[in-house]
Image (cartoon, helix red, strand yellow):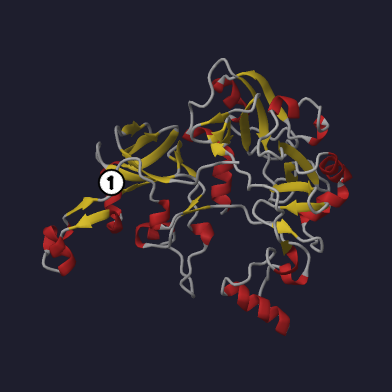
Amino acid sequence: MSNSTHRVDIIRIDEILPHPNADSLGIVYIGGYQCVVKKDNFLVGDLALYIQPDTIVPATEPFKFLWADREFADGTIPERLRRITVRRFRKEWSEGLLMPLKDFHELYNWNNQHAAGGLSGYDYYIGTPKVSEGDDVAELLGFTHYEEPEPVPNINRGQQYKGLPKSLRGWFWYILAKLHIYRPAVYGADQCKAPKQFCPVYDVEGFKNYPRTFSADEDVIVTEKIHGSNARYIFTSADQKMHVGSHNYWKSEKSTCIWRRALKEFPWIEAFCRAYPNHTVYGEIVPTQSGYRYGCKENEIKFFVFDVLKPDGTYYDKACLFSNEYIDHSKLVPILGVGKFDLEAIKKHIEGSAKSTLDSSHLMEGLVICSAKERIVRGPGRAQLKIKSMAFLEREGKNK
């Protein structure tokens, strides 16, 4: 679990490096991230907004260039066009988007005469920033974090409509969905109440946000990050009941969703949960994302465990989890390496177009670095961080 949120930070540009293949472009480093920028848009010392990959930008004036060549009858800009991704400009990676502070009127304190309409020309725009370097403006400006859509269960009220509904009941749910009162595959027969036991939404922060988390003498375990659908399972002693959840929601016993299907197809999940009541098993179900089958045949699914939360709110040490003491090794996410932390060696696992260790027909999404012994650190919370493959991020950007 992560204890922080997806940020959009105000940064100060310390240096603009030349782009090796384009005179009009420059390269700016923000922590561990690299952004390609137009030189004319920035000066050294300027304040700017850094927008990380997988951020959804608001449908506002500064971002119109993202969909300038598109027209939409209802005026609604699809989320897929507002998702910031990784791209290459003249063979150089650009991770996210860097925007001049001056593009955002609401981030300035304006002269009183400006508000009253008493200024004109250049003086009309005189104002002082009301934000400082390091401030997070995600909530203020309406940025959100992209999440993979959940697989849709095969039930009438959970179907995602293709075209227009063909019945009165269909029109009823269709209209509710359009009004954002009903959310397909989440509400209705598919969703239920959460268990009373603490079972938080699971997330892992990016390594580039916290590059000093691990020291060279620390024992770490590096695992493959799987591009599927997050799942959580727990048997609670209070109600003697098995609970099944996706990343954000808990699934009804009547649901035909993939999370309930996995529980039926893999009885060892419930057997483990009953043997260790009030322990939450976290894992990834595949295949749920287009193009990433992980060796599954037609109509086959797989489930890979990556963590277990104890009743006291702490997690098992990764060294114990991956030692086969609790769960058979074949049921865990693949291990890429075990040993002392060595960033350069670790990054080699995802260099170029590295393939998944489970299926050589598609890219590896990335990796997760975990301290072998459970450890809490300032910032990300737990000493475990992810690094996504640049080739994977570029592919996702092209497919949006």
Please state which of residues 358 and 56 is positioned toward the viewer in this rendering: 56
Q: Give the quadrant of the N terminus.
A: top right
The number of numbered badges drawn on the structure is 1
Q: Position of residue 131 (x, y in %)?
A: 29, 48
Q: Position of residue 252 (x, y in %)?
A: 77, 61
347 sits left or right of 51 in the view: right
Residue located at (32% from left, 32% from top): 18
Please state which of residues 24 and 335 is positioned toward the viewer in this rendering: 335
The vertical placement of 392 against 64, above or below, is: above
Neighbour tally class for label 1: few under 14, some 14-19, many 20 plus, Cα within 10 Å: few
Q: Is residue 53 visible?
A: yes
The vertical placement of 74 against 280, above or below, is: below
Residue located at (82% from left, 43% from top): 273
Outermost residue to the bottom: 168
Question: At label 1, which amino acid type do we have?
Answer: Asn
> Mark 1 highlights which residue?
41
Snapshot quadrant of residue 169: bottom right
Outermost residue to the top: 217
71 sits left or right of 243 in the view: left
Q: Give the quadrant of the C terminus.
A: bottom right
Q: Is residue 298 visible?
A: no
Helix, strand or loop at disc 1?
helix
Please state which of residues 300 and 132 is positioned toward the viewer in this rendering: 132
Residue located at (46% from left, 65% from top): 70
Q: Position of residue 380 (x, y in %)?
A: 52, 36
Q: Position of residue 4 (x, y in %)?
A: 50, 43
83 sits left or right of 98 in the view: right
The vertical placement of 309 against 399, above or below, is: above
